[in-house]
């Protein structure tokens, strides 16, 4: 008997590992972003208040970088699953790149924001954004210059759309975590929520993550290999 046949509703959580093979640095691997920069210098509201130029320059470079890379086989496999899956599916990403959507994923939620929108702290509007913010452009809605910030959830800020994530998890049969170290909450706590509700849990990661013991099943290897193999399996089943 194939246990996958009992699965109707899926919640998938992705992290930096899913984009690593596209050429985007992860945060906590050796040589990763948080070895190159201190979190407290570039990824907190306090850092932005203290040294906005440094913070805006960091995110301008990251925004430029993500526009130079392409989705990989893991992004395409998840988009293929999204299109083919008849039940509910929610792809929750902590990533702020747009590689899931460029691969074709539709049922997608960016819980940590995105590089490709800018948020005006004067009028609270968000705008599609591909250029720089260091030059303090005017907000397209209210016209005030110098009030646009990266639409990124910084440490100490509340991730986006948590109600939708918990709602989907409450109705899920399977929770899959892909390419995330399990170091940052609340995302890292979703596996334990899932276990408490009796939902099946699966980790797909290069190596055992911090939270690996919380998962009922783990498969280790590069995302471009383990994710397409898992998608083939669940669609075949
Ligand atoms: N395939 C699969 N997994 C990989 C690959 C790969 N090719 N390369 C690296 N990984 C794994 C690493 O082993 C690690 O467990 O991806 C994970 C990446 O972990 P982090 O760098 O901590 O990234 P993430 O979990 O997404 O970070 C969460 O932290 O700083 C914040 O807001 C930022 O959203 C981010 C959050």
Image: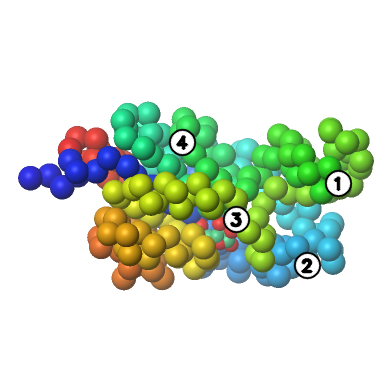
Task: Calculate the distance from the C-alpha at mark 3 to the C-alpha at mark 1.
Answer: 20 Å
Mark closest to the chain's N terminus, 4 or 3: 4
Residue 131 image position (x, y, % from top left): 76, 38
Task: Calculate the distance from the C-alpha at mark 4 to the C-alpha at mark 3.
Answer: 18 Å
Q: Crowdedness of circle 2 by 10 Å Cα count: few (<14), some, many (20+)?
A: some
| Mark 3 touches mark 2? (CB < 8 Å) | no
Does residue 10 lie above or below 217 as drawn? above
Mark closest to the chain's N terminus, 4 or 1: 4
Q: Which residue is mark 2?
A: 46
**Point 41% across, 70% down: residue:** 210
In the rendered image, which quarter contains the N terminus? top left
Q: Which residue is mark 4?
A: 107
Q: Secondary structure at mark 2?
A: helix
Task: Calculate the distance from the C-alpha at mark 1 to the C-alpha at mark 2.
Answer: 18 Å
Tell me if 123 is positioned left or right of 100 in this view.
right
Residue 67 image position (x, y, % from top left): 63, 38
Residue 159: numbered disc: 3
Query: Can residue 88 be seen at all in this image of the molecule?
Result: yes
| Mark 3 touches mark 1? (CB < 8 Å) | no
Does residue 186 lie above or below 234 as drawn? below
Residue 66 image position (x, y, % from top left): 61, 43
**Point 38% across, 68% down: residue:** 211
In the rendered image, which quarter contains the C terminus? top left
Ligand 1 contact, mark 3 (Cβ < 8 Å): no
Task: Specify how the rendered protein is coloured.
Answer: rainbow
Residue 122: numbered disc: 1
**Point 46% across, 64% down: residue:** 188
Q: Secondary structure at mark 1?
A: loop
């Amino acid at each position: 008997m194939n246990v996958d046949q009992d699965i109707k509703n899926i919640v998938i959580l992705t992290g930096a590992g899913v984009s690593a093979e596209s050429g985007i640095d992860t945060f906590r691997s050796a040589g990763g972003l948080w070895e190159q920069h201190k979190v407290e210098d570039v990824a907190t509201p306090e850092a932005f208040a203290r040294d906005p130029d440094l913070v805006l320059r960091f995110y301008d470079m990251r925004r430029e970088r993500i526009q130079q890379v392409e989705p990989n086989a893991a992004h395409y496999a998840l988009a293929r699953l999204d299109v083919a899956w008849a039940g509910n599916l929610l792809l929750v990403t902590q990533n702020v790149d747009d590689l899931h959507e460029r691969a074709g994923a539709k049922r997608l939620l960016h819980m940590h924001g995105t590089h490709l929108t800018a948020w005006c702290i004067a009028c609270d509007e968000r705008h599609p954004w591909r250029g720089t913010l260091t030059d303090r452009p005017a907000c397209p809605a209210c016209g005030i210059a110098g009030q646009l910030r990266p639409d990124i959830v910084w440490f100490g800020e509340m991730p986006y759309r948590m109600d939708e994530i918990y709602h989907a998890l409450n109705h899920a049969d399977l929770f899959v975590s892909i390419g995330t170290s399990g170091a940052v909450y609340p995302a890292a706590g979703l596996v334990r929520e899932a276990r408490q509700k009796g939902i099946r849990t699966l980790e797909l990661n290069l190596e055992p993550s911090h939270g690996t013991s919380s998962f009922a099943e783990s498969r280790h290897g590069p995302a471009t290999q383990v994710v397409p193999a898992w998608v083939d399996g669940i669609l075949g089943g």
